[in-house]
Image (tube, rainbow, N blue to C red):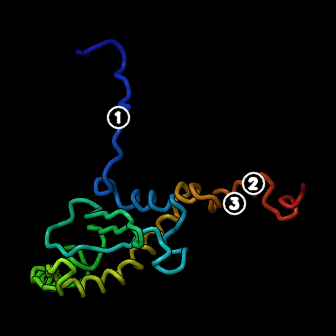
Amino acid sequence: MADGPGQPRPDLGFRTPDPEEIGFFELLRRLEREGLRFGRSGGPGSEPARLGQRARLAMATRDIAGFAPPGERTPAQVDVEVLGLFGPEGAMPLHMTRWIMSRQSERWFTAADSGGQGRVTADTTFLDFCNMLQHRQLALFWRAWADQHPEVGIEHSSGGKVAAMLKTLAGVASPAVRAAP
């Protein structure tokens, strides 16, 4: 039995989901809405986010393992679970994932900062190197997927292939028609 007559009112306090709660494709689609595009903007520094992976031994339970918003001088960081080199689903042998995790568990101390405190850090060198390579692989995977889905291309100012097809169908795609007053 319903609490009151009619349909319930919409929730006006709708909360935007955390990036970890949404899928890989939807997160990258939202990141591209800001203007920069993966795989078309030049080098990795001119893309909306850095893509990578965290070392783990558990099976993937979601698409996104973590998201760090952009800083003053750094782009956003997206760590994925579903694709990558490491973990049970990865292309690299499992002992490589274990080796990376053991290197991360070892603690290294850096030089003292201005407060006289040394900073504890982990060795992420090999994982960072692999993430540099994986960034390009993940960006090209996204670009191939996005190029085949017209709803992604239509969100950008150029409109992508869909806008070009509609202009051609309407007869306004030729340069002579566009140049006419």
Give the residue pinned by disc 2: 169
Viewer-proximal residue among 178 and 92: 178
Q: Is residue 66 left or right of residue 94?
A: right
- Rendering quarter of residue 75: bottom left
Q: Quadrant of residue 64?
A: bottom left
Q: Position of residue 72 (x, y in %)?
A: 41, 68
Circle 3 sits in a helix, a strand or a loop, which is it? helix
Kindly report the distance in space between the C-alpha atoms of the residues bearing marks 3 and 2. 9 Å
Mark 3 or mark 2: which comes first in sequence? 3
Question: 10 Å neighbourhood of mark 1: few (<14), some, or many (≥20)?
Answer: few
The circle drawn on residue 13 is 1
Residue 6: horizontal and vertical position, in percent?
36, 15
Secondary structure at numbered mark 2 = helix
What residue is shown at x 29% (from left), y 75% (from top)?
A: 84
| Residue 122 drawn at (x, y percent) | 16, 81
Where is residue 105? Give x, y as percent. Answer: 10, 79
Q: Specify the amino acid type for callout 3.
A: Ala
- Of label 1 and label 2, which has the lower sequence position? 1
Marks 3 and 2: which is nearer the front?
3
For label 3, the residue is: 164
